[in-house]
Image: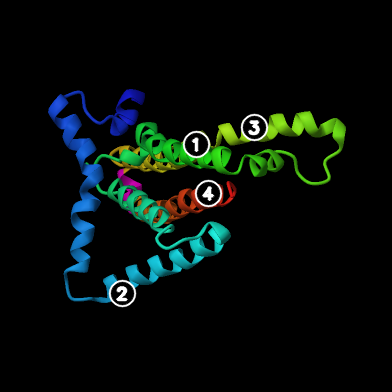
Amino acid sequence: MMSNLFSIFDPSTNLFNLSINWMSTMLGIIFLPYSFWIIPNRHFILWNFILNKLHNEFKTLLKNNYFKGSTFIFISMFSFVLFNNFLGLFPYIFTSTSHLTLTLSISLPLWLSFMLYGWINNYQHMFTHMIPQGTPSILMPFMVLIETISNIIRPGTLAVRLTANMIAGHLLMTLLSSTGPNMSYFILLLIIIQIMLLILESAVAIIQSYVIAILSTLYSSEVN
């Protein structure tokens, strides 16, 4: 039972299907640009409204780090993660964001670039950031250790947070759907619960996309 349950997160054992499953991650790059070639409709206007709001928020968070186009990478990350989160809610479609392979590939290079930029260009600020103002002298070594550990685990926490939330929701939906044949008398109740859970998962998909983008923006603003 458990192997069947977790097999929904297995890309495939077949090499051809494996490559096709991971290629589905890039479908957003193919389809999303079409919105810029069609006549603007309400969906296009809503999407542009969301992106503009994100741009203004990221611009505020970056403060002195902001320059023209600097928010584009975080908006692109939000769009990419959001698309793949929603794609995984459809039946028989591989959920790439439920794998640390993808989430670490997003968070680790970003974190490394922030750290390298900060330590090379603003090493004094990076050192002072390790010790909060007003820290007693006896606690300074411990604060440096704690801040160092918290910095090192940042890419892992970003990746695991997104992966764990995607896995938890999909497992719950799979468990409920697998109990349907054994609870035929409560099938209507199960359908209602599944719909409510699908709405919840849609909200989680949006929230987790926003969280990984906003935290990456905050980590970027700390290095200057």
Q: Mark 3 to mark 2: distance in Å?
A: 43 Å
User: What count of labels does the image hold?
Assistant: 4
| Label 2 crowd bin: few (<14), some (14–19), many (20+), radius 10 Å | few
Q: Mark 3 to mark 4: distance in Å?
A: 16 Å
Q: Earlier in the sequence, mark 3 or mark 2?
A: 2
Query: Hey, what amino acid is under mark 2?
Result: Ile
Residue 88 placed where, x, y %? Answer: 30, 45
Residue at image coords 53%, 56%: 65
Between 182 and 30, the one nearer to me in the picture: 30
Query: Hey, what amino acid is under mark 3?
Result: Thr
Q: Earlier in the sequence, mark 1 or mark 2?
A: 2
Residue 67 visible to an observer of this rendering: yes
Residue at image coords 36%, 49%: 81
| Front: mark 2 or 4 | 4
Residue marked by disc 4: 220
Q: Mark 1 to mark 2: distance in Å?
A: 33 Å
Residue 45, numbered label: 2
